[in-house]
Image: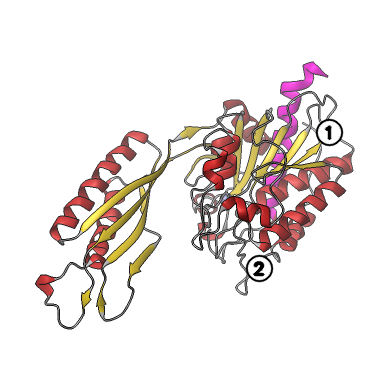
Amino acid sequence: MNKLSVNGERLWSTIMETAKFGGTDKGGVCRLTLSDADRQVRDWLVRECESAGCAVSIDEMGNIFARRSGKVNTLPPIAIGSHLDTQPSGGKFDGIAGVLSGLEVLRTLNEAGYTTIAPLELINWTNEEGSRFTPPMLASGVFAGVFERDFTYAIEDRDGKTFVAELERIGYRGERKCGDHKLGAYFELHIEQGPVLEAENRMIGVVTGMQGQRWYEVTVTGQEAHAGSTPMHLRHDAMVACARMVEAIHEIALNHAPLAVSTVGLVAVKPNSRNVIPGSVFFTVDLRHPDDNVLLQMDRELRERVDNIAKETDVQAKLVNNWNVASMEFNEECINHVRNAAEALGYRHRDLISGAGHDAVYIARVAPTGMIFIPCEHGISHNEMENTKPEYVAAGANVLLHAVTAYDEARNAATR
Ligand SMILES: [Zn+2]
């Protein structure tokens, strides 16, 4: 193994520097995809990559690719990536730690005068979060052939603005066709977004795969009526039905403990007035489990419970399953390079299955892929309180550096 080591202080201060783009009073970040803050952080990244000697290109989905030449530039690049967009009340690290660790790897290699055999490519994927434009992992999905470009262009945010119009507005609708080039491999560092590493006092999670996910949208339709003059037994209260459904959805995950999780995270009540019986409620459902068969069982239970509660409460319920991702496993060779790097660097590590979706999950369909997790404080993420420690980020970036260089040596030494 080479003796390279990242500059942890520089990496931490770079993360803090980008936190000002969309920074909130509570110390978090609000940098919704294709917002002005997103444009600012993209402009910043492009400048930093160019001053690190990279050639930057933008594709038609706004994905940013910064390429650092290798010794054999006909080889497909080994890519490092993640995302710079955040949830509306997001933190400073989700996605960001991955992109900026990649930047730190490039800076470290530059300082050491180390040239990899294959070129390296740092990637910022557009709209990982899926908060403003649903579904998430949108542009890595187009890159991997999961979504059609034109399907994503037409997606509207809650104000009716389309993805493509906003992409153009911030000046990041690039020329390059999305998915036009092959990646030799893909590595992504991410905060764990769960409590396991911290609880076990480990620095590194070697991510072996991701659990399956299913997303739904439920619209419950009852009847608006006066809150004072409508007797209880004559009501069609969409909110009461929704409340019972939320409870039932919670129970579905408990019935498949300990690995199942279920969440109702968005609820919109109409007309949302204190003296009107709610006539309609829209809510979302997120079900996850590492075993796709159990997840399908949870799907059946969800449909049955929603139907039954609608009947009992005298309302109509329409359930739409709008997004699914099957559980998956990452590439064994990439996983081994991550594990070996953690081991060789003396970091306490363990294997983990990701509870969250990541761009790496889609990229794994088109390139050998591995992921590195670092602990985050109390496992809290998608929250302005999201936090980690400089030593964790530095450890993760070092594992990234060594996994990438070791993969390059193992794969490409013969072509030099
Ligand atoms: Zn993320």
Magenta stretch encompasses residue 118: no
Check disc 2 and give the amino acid type.
Answer: Gly
Residue lying at 28% horizontally and 65% vertically, measured from the top left: 280
Q: Which element is circle 1 on?
A: loop
Residue 7, above or below 211: below
Position of residue 35 measured from the top left corner of the image (x, y, whole percent): 63, 61
* Residue 204 locus on image (x, y percent): 60, 44
> Which residue is located at x 62 percent, y 61 percent?
31
- 22 left or right of 324? right
Nearer-the-camera pick, 166 or 145: 166
Q: Amino acid at mark 1?
A: Ser
Q: Find disc 1 in the rendering and name its residue.
A: 69
- Quadrant containing the N terminus in the rendered view: top right
Question: What are the residue bounds of the magenta stretch?
Answer: 391-416
- Name the residue at the left extreme: 233
**Helix, strand or loop at mark 2:** loop
Residue, disc 2? 23
Drawn side of residue 332 relative to residue 51, left or right: left
**Residue 346 at least partly seen:** no
Q: Is residue 362 visible?
A: yes
- 10 Å crowding of disc 2: few (<14), some (14-19), many (20+): many
